[in-house]
Amino acid sequence: MLGHTGAKLPNDGFSLINPFDNTNVPHEFYIEVAGFRYQGIALEDITESMPVNFILEPSNLKDQNTVRVEVAGQKIGYGMGIE
């Protein structure tokens, strides 16, 4: 568990540690999604096989580096710690 989380608490944010050198091997990607509970989609409605899109929002007035997270075309929140 420590190796998987990098010994961080959930509210510390996550770090991407896999360099993705080999694109032929499946990878797991974890991020925090801010605002999920306000989007009107239930966690039970999301499955591992659903497509996820990360959409830049450079016109966002609060943060020009904002990344909107969509699952199956529906916004579920904003990615935190994506650089």
Image (cartoon, rainbow, N blue to C red):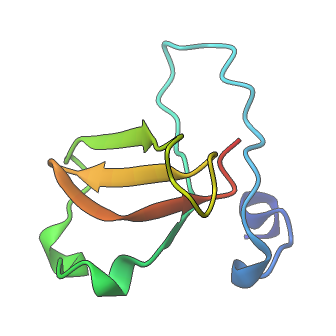
Residue 7 coordinates in the image, percent (x, y): 86, 71
Q: Residue at x 15, y 48 (%)?
A: 73
In the displayed structure, does residue 35 sit left or right of residue 28? Answer: left
Q: Residue at x 56, y 56 (%)?
A: 30
When the figure is inspected, residue 22 is found, relative to residue 32, above or below; the finding is: above
Q: Nearer the viewer, residue 35 or 45?
A: 35
When the figure is inspected, residue 43 is found, relative to residue 48, above or below; the finding is: below
Residue 26 coordinates in the image, percent (x, y): 47, 29
The answer to which quarter of the image holds residue 54 is top left
The residue most toward the right is 7
Residue 69 coordinates in the image, percent (x, y): 38, 53
In the displayed structure, does residue 36 sit left or right of residue 83? Answer: left
Q: Nearer the viewer, residue 47 or 73?
A: 73
Residue 1 coordinates in the image, percent (x, y): 72, 70
Where is the C terminus found, in terms of image quarters? top right
Q: Nearer the viewer, residue 40 or 49?
A: 40
When the figure is inspected, residue 62 is found, relative to residue 56, above or below; the finding is: below
Q: Residue at x 20, y 65 (%)?
A: 46
In the displayed structure, does residue 49 sit left or right of residue 5? Answer: left
The residue most toward the bottom is 37
Q: Residue at x 33, y 40 (%)?
A: 53
In the displayed structure, does residue 77 sit left or right of residue 49? Answer: right
- Number of marks present in the image shown: 0
